[in-house]
Image (cartoon, grey):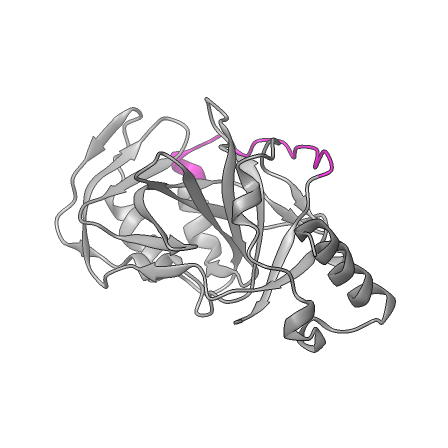
């Protein structure tokens, strides 16, 4: 049976039978859709419609994030904080390894879920040896203070368009939710120039928190929100990981 037919069957069974995602049998969940993404055009960010996602099971992505990395630079671009990490941290999707190139922040979040935004969003940009790109998005909400955020806010220069290489190691895992299993994935684009498309987006369902003081401190450094407006789905499918194979 074709992937398109399997996807339709999965969606029909979930909606028509009013099953929860945990009730979807393994043989009714579609395969990891990454092979289709190279042929799909469309821009990011998007408003993720949780009620119409296509459910699938996968062990990906596999994270290879060490507990301590050296940040080669933390930059104040004039619009947002952007950091690059030394070493070879990365993820594996479908057997392909993507190295972490950089991560940066958007205020407020760029992605929305059923119309709801986060206070901020971090994008971790990964690039494979063949040039393909996979970006992980993690939304923040206001709540408890975040230790990783304090480290980054303390490291970023206050002068626009400058950067520095901070001393000390940084734990990349502080930018990931405690559970990296539930997520949405779709074919999208970079949200900054050059807006290249046909890349893999993974947006985690669990959120992180930052305190109101941390959010205010970032806003003091970067006065203008830098979230790109939502883009049309243009018929793209949005997939939701519901468990392991």
Quarter of the image containing the N terminus? bottom right
Residue 205 in the image, given as x and y percentages of width and height: 57, 60
Give the side of residue 35 with respect to residue 147, left or right: right
Q: Which residue does the image show at 57% across and 31% down from the upper left? A: 228
Question: What's the residue at 61%, 62% (across, down)?
Answer: 56
Name above or below for residue 132 compared with residue 57.
above
On the picture, is 45 further left or further right than 135? right
Instruction: Work out whether residue 74 or residue 123 is closer to the camera in this orientation and state it.
Output: 123
Q: Is residue 86 above or below residue 65?
A: above
Residue 218 visible: yes
Taking the magenta stretch, the answer to whether it contains residue 224 is yes
Residue drawn at (73%, 38%) of the image: 235
Tell me which secondary structure the magenta stretch mostly adopts.
loop
Q: Which residues are magenta?
A: 219-235
**Extreme residue in the right direction:** 16
The total of numbered circles placed on residues is: 0
| Residue at the extreme front | 1
Of 99 and 26, the residue lying toward us: 26
Residue that sits furthest to the left in the current view:
167
Q: Is residue 92 left or right of residue 31?
A: left
Q: In the picture shown, does residue 53 fall above or below 192?
A: below
Which residue is rendered at x = 85% and y = 71% of the image? 17
On the image, the x and y values in percent for residue 208 come to 48, 60
Residue 238: x and y, percent?
66, 49
| Residue 74, horizontal then vertical, whole percent | 25, 39
């Amino acid at each position: 049976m074709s992937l398109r037919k399997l996807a339709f069957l999965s969606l029909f069974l979930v909606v028509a039978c009013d099953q929860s995602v945990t009730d979807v049998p393994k043989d009714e969940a579609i395969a990891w859709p990454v092979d289709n993404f190279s042929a799909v055009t469309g821009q990011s960010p998007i408003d993720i419609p949780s009620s119409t996602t296509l459910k699938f099971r996968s062990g990906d992505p596999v994270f290879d994030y060490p507990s301590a990395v050296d940040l080669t630079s933390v930059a104040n671009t004039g619009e947002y904080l952007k950091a690059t990490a030394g070493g070879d941290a990365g993820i594996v999707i479908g057997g392909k390894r993507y190295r972490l190139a950089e991560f940066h922040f958007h205020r407020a979040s760029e992605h929305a879920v059923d119309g709801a935004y986060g206070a901020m969003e971090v994008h971790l940009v990964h690039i494979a040896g063949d040039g393909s790109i996979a970006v992980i998005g993690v939304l923040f909400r206001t709540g408890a203070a975040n230790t990783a955020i304090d480290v980054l806010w303390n490291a970023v220069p206050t002068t626009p368009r400058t950067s520095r290489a901070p001393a000390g190691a940084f734990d990349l895992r502080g930018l990931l939710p405690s559970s990296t299993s539930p997520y949405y994935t779709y074919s999208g684009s970079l949200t900054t120039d050059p807006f290249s498309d046909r890349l893999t987006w993974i947006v985690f369902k669990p959120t992180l928190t930052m305190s109101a003081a941390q959010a205010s401190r970032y806003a003091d450094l970067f006065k203008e929100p830098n979230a790109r407006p939502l883009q049309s789905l243009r018929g793209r499918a949005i997939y939701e990981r519901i468990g392991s194979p």
